[in-house]
Image: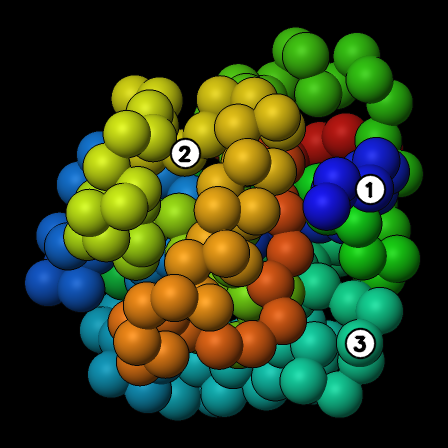
Amino acid sequence: MKKKEINYNANGFIVKRLDGDFASNYKNYMGIDGDVWPIDKYSKGLNSDDIKFLCDYIDENVTLSDFNTTGVDVCNDIEFLNMYIEACKKTDFQIEVLFCETEKMTPIYEMNTGNIKEKFKFLGFDYGYPGTDYYSCVYSDVKTIPEMSHMTLNKNGLFETEKEVIEFILIRDKLKNVLPQNIFEQGEFIIYKLWRYIGEYPLKFL
């Protein structure tokens, strides 16, 4: 069965921590999986009111995909995003900002093509949950399931082309019918076209 043509929407951003015990598991992988939205009640260098505001905002405005099937859990509020990035700096977190394009209809971040080419570096294609824990099938399956050992990932631990990620999905779906069910994470997954922000902070583009 052929995968239908994909129409990507420019959805928004996620912030991912690059240091710390949890993040150390994700060497040579720059996709959605990992320590995303890392600030929590244990974060040092921030007062409790700031932490509560940041975490509440994420809960109420970003991580909504469990209740909204048309959405992906990213942020398109640049003012809040800059606030969150500044808070991460206060905690001495090393972070990166990823820009996500998916088939999901919400949210939408209007950005011209020039900004993408000028301030972002293309990373590759991932395949995972639209949010919640940002689980990636690419990260979890390709290097652990022998039947997928022939697949090639780029230096970012992602598929370089849309064709490759679609092939991965088709093979994964077939393997789910012949291998033990507990090998594969179940659920609704989406393709991510990912970019890494390489511009200056604070973010200033429309």
Q: Could you tell which of marks 2 and 1 lies nearer the N-terminus?
A: 1
Residue marked by disc 1: 4
Badge 2, how many Cα within 10 Å: few under 14, some, many 20+?
many
- Between the residue at mark 2 and the residue at mark 3, the CA separation in whole angstroms equals 25 Å
Q: CA distance from mark 1 to mark 3?
A: 19 Å
Q: Which mark is residue 158?
A: 2
Q: Residue 114: x percent and y percent?
A: 79, 12
Callout 1: SS: loop
Describe residue 187's horizontal placement relative to residue 154 as left or right: right
Taking 152 as reference, is 195 left or right?
right
For residue 159, the mark is: none
- Which residue position is annotated with label 3? 69
Compare marks 2 and 3 and give the one earlier in the sequence. 3
Describe residue 6's horizontal placement relative to residue 57 as left or right. Answer: right
- The quarter in which the C terminus is drawn is top right
Mark in front: 2 vs 1: 1
Secondary structure at badge 3 equals loop
Q: Are marks 2 and 1 in contact (CB under 8 Å)?
A: no
